[in-house]
Image (cartoon, rainbow, N blue to C red):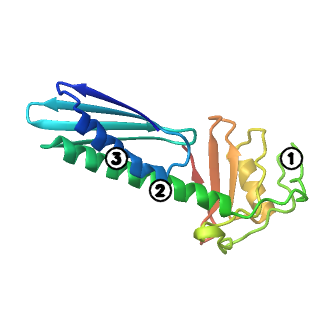
Amino acid sequence: MKLEVTGRHVDVTPALRAFTREKVGKLGKWIDDPMEVHAILTVEKRRHIAEIVVRSRNVDLSAREVTMDMYTSIGECVDKLERQAKKHKEKFETRRRRAPVSRGAPAPPEDPGDGSTPARNVKHRNLPSAGVDGIPRIVRTNIVPRKPMSVEEAALQVKESGLDFFVFRNERSQELNVLYVLKDGTLGLIEP
């Protein structure tokens, strides 16, 4: 671990440097890579400010704390950094635990380009089954036609396909719009 301690309006004593090194060393159990740590210690009137920036290969963390005592500021700042590092590591491990995507999966069909939707688009009301950590899995994708169309054309697409909603590019505004079916069978339009 490379530690750099900068003092602004305060002398960085060996005791303060050793305390900072000891506290920042706790981050080693959350961050495996070699770390570069830059601690900026500042005194403004009675406020003691500790700002610590940690850089490693996979993550950059920073925290700032203001108290009436420099040692307390450093301790609380490192506690914030530890929470950030723990959150990052858990997030990273969650990604690694997910099942890998099989390489033999069929490629999605090409967009016919005529504004029609592929035959595999069907009406679904149930939520997809949950994957790791309760995050829903995406099991199918719908292809949005590239050519702009009027709201009337989009309404025909909704009627023909039987979908609950249809995403299209409005030919008038060139913005993405959503046309959806209401409970009474009428259509609603969402424009940005």
Pointers 1 and 3 in contact (CB under 8 A)?
no
Count of numbered labels shown in the rendering: 3
Which mark's residue is nearer the viewer, 2 or 1? 2
Q: CA distance from mark 1 to mark 3?
A: 59 Å
Q: Secondary structure at mark 1?
A: loop
Name the side, left or right, on which 82 lies relative to 111: left
Question: Which residue lies most toward the front here?
Answer: 14
Report x, y in % for residue 128: 68, 71
Q: Which residue is mark 2?
A: 87
Instruction: State the residue in front, 179 or 26.
Output: 26
Q: Which residue is mark 3?
A: 22
Crowdedness of circle 1 by 10 Å Cα count: few (<14), some, many (20+)? Answer: some
Report x, y in % for residue 141: 76, 57
Evaluate whether residue 99 shows in this view. yes
Identity, as a three-letter code, of the amino acid under mark 3: Glu
Name the side, left or right, on which 81 lies relative to 151: left
Q: Quadrant of residue 11?
A: top left
Report x, y in % for residue 135: 60, 66
Q: CA distance from mark 2 to mark 3?
A: 21 Å
Q: Secondary structure at mark 3?
A: helix
Question: Which residue lies most toward the top here?
Answer: 9
Q: Which residue is mark 1?
A: 111
Identity, as a three-letter code, of the amino acid under mark 2: Lys
Identity, as a three-letter code, of the amino acid under mark 1: Asp
Q: Considering only vertical position in the picture, is 147 above or below 155?
A: above
